[in-house]
Structure formats: structure tokens, C-alpha cells
Image (cartoon, rainbow, N blue to C red):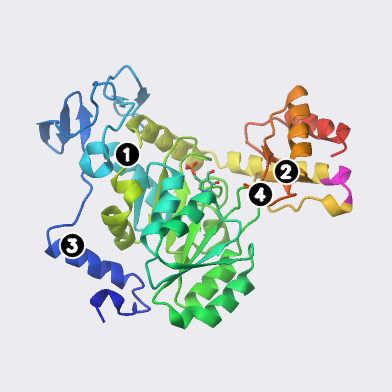
Amino acid sequence: MTASMQPAKPDRPFAWLERRLDEADQQGMRRRLVPRQMDGPYLLEGDRRLANFGANDYLGIAMDSSSATGSDERGETPATFGSGAAASPLVCGFTPLHARLCGELAHLEQVESVVLFPSGFAACSGVVATLPEAGDLVLSDALNHASLIDGCRLSKATRFIYPHCDHRAVGSLLAAHRKRFDRVFIVTDSIFSMDGTRAPLVALADLADEYKATLIVDEAHGTGVLGHRGGGLCEELGVEGRIAIRIGTLSKAVGAQGGFVAGPQVVTDYLLQRARPLIYSTAASPATIAAALDGLRIIREEPERRRRVLDLSGRLIEELNRQLPAKRRIVDHGTPIIPVVIGEASKTVETAGRLADAGFYVPAIRPPTVPPNQSRLRISLSAAHTDEMLTELCETLRTFGL
Ligand SMILES: Cc1ncc(COP(=O)(O)O)c(C=O)c1O
């Protein structure tokens, strides 16, 4: 048995990653992030100013300071942020601003460490493709986001798909198969993007404890919206300390772009060595990172925004249910995603077109994004919607018989 095949000790579930990082250290192969700030054709690295021959900014546009400006988040100095990072994080795309965002996200998530990815999709697919290996098992919710599904497809681990949100099915699969596999990962969205449903995270965390499995949760639609601090569904349910690996996106509630993985230092260090979408893709641009820092500030300082969007969601569902027949009533999951299931794809598209004619953009979601005959209008709410906008939408849907 090689060192990496020894079962993890319960108190150190990522001992296998620690061993691999030690090996990389010994071989001089360990990658580390160094914050470096572009300054025209130079790089500022700590006290040093280095002529930069590492960026892919071939035309010098990324650091054209007129292309994107912003104010320093702490208001100390005016700052100019480049429109492009010009290289992957391990080359010179990781700036002090990226480092600051990692720190703030780690605080929001109450974790040891955060590593950034160029998008939420890259974070989800990267984590699931990297951590589970041949000889491991991944249990994946049937309605997981495409990015998690692609991660499963790229991984060499065995994959079982369990019925949507069915933690009992997860329990049965674990009881039947746990012993056959080195490591087991349970992978789930926290809020499902096309249904607004919530994953049964408490029950899944219990199962993960019982069967020594690792729970990986994609908080794409939870970050900033749920929880007292805006830490997502994990925070709201009080299970953040029990879910070692959480994925988030900066492109939804945070209002910018990019993705992140939050968890123990050993996990983010390992991803930095092995997660291909992180290593081989240009880092999110400094301008985007500045926007994300500002988004986090708003999430911290204006909790009324999350109260407002959830309040609007409750009110809209109540209103819609008043006009819908019992069998088509919408379940209130306490999320800003409200599916109005119509069924047939053509009818759904036609209804979306009529809504647009009436002044409302509500996307029609069809297969393969949702199962056949479950096409739907997907209403996504925002704290910026006014009460009048909601009332008018309800009235219009009513005139359509919805
Ligand atoms: C559940 C879920 N995970 C991940 C993603 C990907 O995030 P991003 O848009 O930042 O790539 C999305 C975006 O649609 C999503 O809905």
C-alpha cells in the first residue's frame, strides 16, 4: 500500500493531501501564490520592482490605466486597477487585491483559506475533477449544476447519482458501498438553480460524519443571500463548520465575476498544485476583483438587501399561489429563485415571448437544462425590484392564466 492509499485518520480527514504536499515540497515542486501588482511593464513584488517578462499582456492593454478605474476599498488611496490580470495566478496574475479578496472571503466563510478560480464553473468542475480519484466514490445529486456534473465526468472516481435532495438514498448508497472505496465525496448544490430547492445539508453532514465522507457544497446561489452574515445556506443552517469544502461564485449576489473554493489550507494548497482550471487559466482581472471586494462590503454593510429579496420572494409566491390551481402551487423554499412550471417547451417559450411583449423578461428554461415536460419560467428576484414591479408581474401572469 502506498502512502497515499492509507485511509485518512478521522481527526485529519485530509491527511492524504498533507502527505502529497510534503512530497511536492521535498521535490521542490510545490507551487505557491505570490501577490504581484502590475505597474506598466514592471511588477511590484513586496519591496521590489521587477521588469515583467511573465505577463501575456502582448499589446500592453491590460495595464492601460484608462481602461478600468476604481477607488481603493479602504478609501486610503485612489487606485487604478487593470482590466486584465494578464497571466495565471501562479505566474503573475495574483495581485495584492486578489490576496485581499481571499482574506475577506475566508472571513465571510469562516474558513482557514480561500483560493480563487476564474469562474464559478471552473471552481466547481475543478474541485470535483481534482479531489476524487480512481478508487474513490462521488455521490452527486440528480439536479446538480452542469459544472459539478462536468467535474464528475472528468474525475476518474466512480460516480453514483442520487435522486434530488434524497438524503435517505445517500444513506442507502453509503451503507451498501462505502467499504469498497478509499474515499467518498458527497457533492451538492446548496440552492438548486432551476428549482430554488435547498439541499438537506444537515442530514448530509450527519451522513458524511457517520461514513467518513467529505461533503462538497456549491453555494453559488446561497453566498450573500442566506445566513446572518451572507455566508450562504451552510451558515443559515449552522453547518459551516461541518462542511469542509464550499464553493462560491462572485458572479451572482456578489455582483462581479469569478469563483472560489473555501476550506482548510491543505485543500486550497492542494488545488493550487493540481486544479487545472486554476493553474492553466488567466486569473480574474484586478478590476473584477475590486468589484467583488465592493460587493462583499455591501453584503457586510447592507444586510437589509438579503432580507428584502427573501421577503419579495415570499410575497410573490404567496401572490402566485393565490391564482394557481392546487396541483401547480409553488413551494416556498426561501430562495430568490421561483420556477413557474408550464410543462411543454413550446408553450413555455411562447409564454416568455408574451411576457416580453408585456414588458417583462422572464427566461424560458427548457430541456436539457430541466427534465422533459418540466419547462418553466424561471423568475429570479433582486432586492432592486420594486413592489410595483412585482405587482405588475403578478397581474400579467394572472391575465395569462398563470
Ligand atoms: C449552481 C451553480 N453553480 C455554479 C455556477 C457557475 O457559476 P459562474 O457563473 O460564476 O461560472 C452556476 C451559474 O449558473 C450555478 O447556477
Q: Is residue 155 above or below residue 314?
A: below
Tell me where residue 332 appears, x and y as whole percent: 73, 52
Q: Nearer the viewer, residue 7 or 346?
A: 346
Label 3 and label 2: CA atoms lie apart by: 49 Å
* Residue tagged 2: 376
Please state if 164 lies on the left or on the right of 272 as rendered: right
Tell me where residue 194 appears, x and y as whole percent: 64, 48
Cβ atoms under marks 4 and 1 closer than 8 Å: no
The quadrant of the image that shows the C terminus is: top right
Disc 2 marks a residue whose amino acid type is: Arg
* Residue tagged 4: 370
Residue name at image x 26 percent, y 68 percent: 18
Tell me where residue 81 appears, x and y as whole percent: 31, 27
Cβ atoms under marks 4 and 2 closer than 8 Å: yes
Is residue 349 in sight in this rendering? yes
Please state if 28 lies on the left or on the right of 231 as rendered: left
As helix, strand or loop, the secondary structure at mark 2 comes to: strand
* Classed neighbour count for the residue bearing mark 3: other residues with Cα under 10 Å, few (<14), some (14–19), many (≥20): some
Residue name at image x 45 percent, y 65 percent: 241
* Residue tagged 1: 283
Magenta residues, as a range? 321-325
